[in-house]
């Protein structure tokens, strides 16, 4: 019985997301924050050092497993004005301040950036997060969130509970607690390392 010919759609969602991820991961690693640039697109933050035990397993030679994945789009703001052309870099500057504020050595972190049109940004972000489930996107959440209003009270985010110091802990610790969150993050990182090894 003859084999059925394969159908291939190069513009299908799986093919597009695979291409975006491959091109993104071929981009060079940059210091955090990177030098000034303009544009919108995807970014990811990686750990490249040796002094933070929790993240040391991610600091391999290729730095393919991100700690955090984010995006900045051209989409108009709520006031109808176009978002700043420096919005993506500004986010990385803001993230750099959060990392330092959380007591982490900024010089041990790197980033990747890929400038893209809005139509592909969500797809690329979904591909990276879906593939890696980065620990700051999935376990130690709250890293990329805006600072709560000055009168708002509540529990600290998971990220701020583990990396306290950036002045966002107006309330109590996260309900899961420091030890539980640290263990969950370590387990997630171990899973990422295993998955990366299985894929090679």
Image: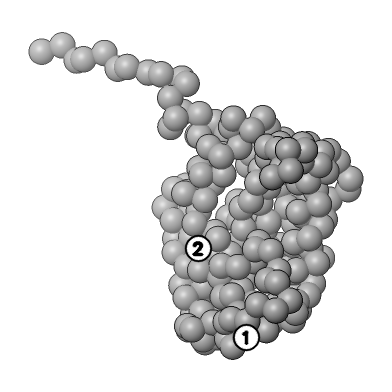
Query: Of the residues under marks 2 and 1, which one precedes in the sequence?
Result: 2
Q: Name the residue under label 2.
A: 138
Tell me: 101 left or right of 21. Answer: right
Which of 115/84 is in front?
84
Q: Quadrant of residue 13?
A: top left
- Which residue does the image show at 61% across and 53% down from the upper left? 69
Tell me, what colour scheme is on the image?
Answer: one colour
* Mark 2 → mark 1, Cα distance in angstroms: 22 Å
Q: In which quarter of the image is residue 54?
A: bottom right
Whether residue 114 appears in this view of the structure is no
Whether residue 25 appears in this view of the structure is yes
Q: Residue 128, percent across and down?
A: 54, 46
Within-10-Å neighbours for mark 2: few <14, some 14–19, many 20+: some
- Which residue does the image show at 49% across and 57% down from the upper left? 133
Q: Name the residue under label 1.
A: 171
Closer to the eye: label 2 or 1:
1
Q: Which residue lies furthest to the front in this view?
A: 79
- Which residue does the image show at 54% across and 82% down from the upper left? 174
Tell me: 14 left or right of 128. Answer: left
Q: Residue 161, percent across and down?
A: 61, 81
Q: Residue 103, percent across and down?
A: 76, 78
Callout count: 2
If the image is split into quadrants, where does the N terminus sit?
top left
Q: Quadrant of residue 63?
A: bottom right
Instruction: Indicate the secondary structure of the residue bearing disc 1.
Output: loop
Q: Indicate whether 165 appears above or below 20.
A: below
Q: Indicate whether 142 appears above or below 32.
A: below
Tell me: 140 left or right of 92. Answer: left
Instruction: Indicate the secondary structure of the residue bearing disc 2.
Output: helix
Return the mark for residue 137: none
């Amino acid at each position: 019985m003859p084999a059925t010919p394969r159908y291939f759609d190069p513009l299908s969602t799986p093919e597009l997301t695979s291409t975006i991820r491959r091109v993104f991961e071929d981009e060079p690693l940059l210091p955090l924050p990177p030098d000034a640039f303009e544009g919108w697109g995807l970014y990811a933050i990686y750990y490249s050092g040796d002094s933070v035990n929790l993240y040391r397993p991610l600091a391999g030679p290729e730095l393919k497993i991100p700690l955090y994945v984010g995006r900045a789009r051209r989409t108009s703001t709520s006031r109808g004005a176009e978002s700043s052309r420096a919005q993506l870099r500004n986010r990385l500057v803001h993230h750099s301040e959060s990392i330092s504020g959380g007591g982490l050595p900024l010089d041990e972190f790197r980033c990747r950036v890929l400038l893209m049109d809005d139509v592909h940004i969500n797809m690329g972000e979904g591909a990276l997060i879906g593939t890696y489930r980065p620990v700051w996107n999935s376990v130690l959440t709250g890293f990329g969130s805006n600072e709560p209003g000055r009168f708002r009270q509540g529990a600290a985010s998971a990220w701020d509970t583990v990396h306290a110091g950036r002045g966002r802990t107006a309330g109590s610790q996260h309900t899961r607690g420091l030890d539980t969150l640290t263990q969950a993050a370590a387990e997630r990182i171990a899973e990422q390392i295993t998955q990366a090894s299985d894929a090679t």
